[in-house]
Amino acid sequence: MRELTHIPPPAGLRTPPLSYAVRTGDLLYISGIGPLSADNTVPEGFAAQMQLVLATLDKVLAQAGADRNRLVKVNVLLTREEDVKEMNRLYAAWYGAGPYPARTTAVVKALPLPEFLLEIEGVAALG
């Protein structure tokens, strides 16, 4: 059986019981990351929340010795359909010219905290 390596959320961050990511073999499974800052606040506005989520995703990938170019699958959950265009713009600016990982975007009724406008999860190849 392969060893599992867990990347926990920062101490003091009010999250549900989860690991930010779990590595098994050459794959890193990244939990849904919401826009929760280090001081347990949620920024106002979609762009600020998206930028915080992407910065946190970069940190999680770095802790595993990877970067965004190792992502193979990304799932984006939004609570408002009108944010899809802005999400695509910010995602493209963050990721760069591509090629992009496979991605699913869904609009959902709610996320773990009512202030969350989005959450992003993914899988990265580390080998």
Image (cartoon, helix red, strand yellow):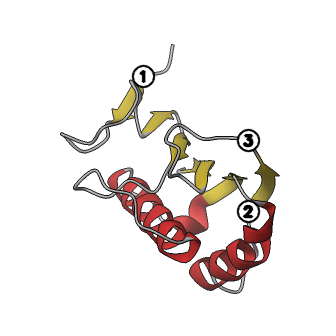
Vertical placement of 116 versus 82: above or below?
above
- Residue 31: image x %, image y %? 52, 39
Residue annotated with mark 3? 109
3D distance between C-alphas at marks 3 and 2:
25 Å
The label on residue 3 is 1
Quarter where residue 55 is shown: bottom left
User: Which element type, helix, strand or loop, lies under badge 2?
Assistant: loop
- Type of amino acid at the residue the image marks with label 3: Lys
Position of 64 with respect to 96 (left or right) is left
Residue annotated with mark 2? 101
Mark found first going from the N terminus, 3 or 2: 2
- Type of amino acid at the residue the image marks with label 1: Glu
User: Which element type, helix, strand or loop, lies under badge 1?
Assistant: loop
Determine the residue located farthest toward the top in the rendered image. Answer: 1
User: Which element type, helix, strand or loop, lies under badge 3?
Assistant: loop
Q: Which residue is more in the foreground, 40 or 123?
A: 40
3D distance between C-alphas at marks 3 and 1:
36 Å
